[in-house]
Amino acid sequence: MLGKKKARELVEKAIAMSEAEQTEIEIMAEESHLTRFANSYIHQNVSGTNVAISVKAIIGKKIGRATTNKMDEASIKETLKKAVEIARVQKENPDFKSLPAPAEVKEIDNYVERTAKFNAEQRAKAVEPIAKGARDNNLKAFGAFTNGVSEIAIGNSLGVFAYNMGTDAYVNTVVMGGTGSGYAQAASRDVDEIDMEAVAATAIEKALKSANPVDVPEGEYMVVLEENAVADMIEFLAYIGLGALAFQEGRSFMCGKLGKELVGKNISIWDDGFDRRGFSFPFDFEGVPKNKVMLIEKGTAKTVVYDTLTAGKENKRSTGHSTGSPLGGPIPLNLFMGEGEGTIEKMVQSTDKGIYVTRFHYTNVLEPIKAVITGMTRDGTFLIENAERTEPVKNFRFTQSILDAFSNTSMIGKEAKLIGSSAGYGARFAMGTVAPALKIDKFKFTGVTHF
């Protein structure tokens, strides 16, 4: 990894070589490690390192971008030149006013040495409870354990410089056997905070109890959603409508709703890059400091998040939510839902007939303005009868407005969990949503599977 001093020197050197009117430099460095397992045996251990330098060049109101992962001076010069050339042939963006000015960024210590140094042998020991537990129960475990370090430095020609280095670890598993399957995950910046025994026990129990599912007809049901399913809904809500670009383009469910009741009064959703319960991070991908932003407060639509470009269009200040992408616009990435007083046990005990859902799978958007999504239940779907979770049921397709679901939420869990997002195949950047379990009185299942 570069370290703050070297990263600053590299940013300042690149800016000094730029011929653009304004220049922004972003450096993303990472060390990533991954252990994959299938059929209850480890089949892959991989590690990789990378550094990417991204340039944003401004010529008037024209913006050009270019990226390299070569660190030598000649390659950086060539990338700067490409960004300027690209800017010159772009159309002017009338909304662009300037790159952000310097502002104080609070420091957050996101680095845990043990997580950074957690090696393949340690990962193998960590996943042993999952693999061995599955084998002992005549089941098969599939999944992955990843850990690593990500380093981000952002600076511009107006004097902005922001830097943070953080670790993260993430594990997820699907345990299968015959006609049943179970899922569990855990994530943290500190690998020692991940309870692998609990992850194993949860997935194995779900796999055993979901065997031999019965047919239940589609329809509208009362549901109890575990935290994984709730986090999925919150993240889709953010993606389709809690950013300023969607709002300004008239495709957000927040349009015409600010200051008005949007969902039930027991629902509050916010973004907070400094809350250590999530994957805290102090600035966005323009180097603008993050602040806590109430998006929905006690059911009322409050605001959307902004980057510099969308804020300039409304003569506002950026809320610190640039993703660095020229296409998607700002998005809240440090999401939280307020807790209630309930527990999953109380939710089940207060339900005469309903469906218990572990998680959603392959969720997609149908109607952004109404926040309608569709997807499948997966890895632990059960019938609730007479205040008890009884038989496993075959998986459903759901087609549901998130806003309607959050308007019909009758109980909220008192303990929220961090539901992590895998590092996947892109640059390593820890993300996750802190969500409680929910009981929702009306939820639409529109199809039934054969498994």
Image (spheres, rainbow, N blue to C red):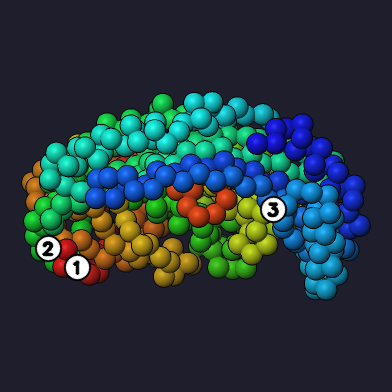
At label 1, the amino acid type is Val
* C-alpha distance separating marks 3 and 1: 47 Å
**Could you tell me if the residues under marks 3 and 1 are in contact, i.e. CB atoms within 8 Å?**
no
Quarter placement of the N terminus: top right
On the rendered structure, is 220 left or right of 322? Answer: left
Q: Position of residue 74 (x, y in %)?
A: 84, 54
Task: Compare residues 229 and 136 and report the one nearer the observer.
Answer: 136
Give the labeled residue for mark 3: 69
Position of residue 82 relative to residue 268, above or below, is below
What amino acid is at disc 2? Val
Query: Where in the figure is residue 444, as x and y percent of width and height?
Result: 26, 63
In the image, 199 versus 293, the foreground residue is 199
Name the residue carrying label 1.
448
Establish if 90 lies above or below 323. Answer: below
Which numbered marker is on residue 358?
Answer: none
How many neighbours does mark 2 have within 10 angstroms: few (below 14), some (14-19), or many (20 or more)? some
Q: Considering only order in the chain, which callout, 2 or 3, is on the residue closer to the N terminus?
A: 3
Callout in the foreground (3, 1):
3
> Could you say which is closer to the camera, residue 272 or residue 252?
272
* Residue ID for mark 2: 216
Name the residue type under label 3: Asn
Residue at screen point 52% across, 32% down: 116
Confirm whether residue 419 shows in the render.
Answer: no
Q: CA distance from mark 1 to mark 2?
A: 8 Å
Give yes or no for contact between labels 1 and 2 (Cβ–Cβ under 8 Å).
Answer: yes
Q: Is residue 166 visible?
A: yes
Residue depth check, mark 3 versus mark 2: number of the one nearer the observer:
3
Cα separation between marks 3 and 2: 53 Å
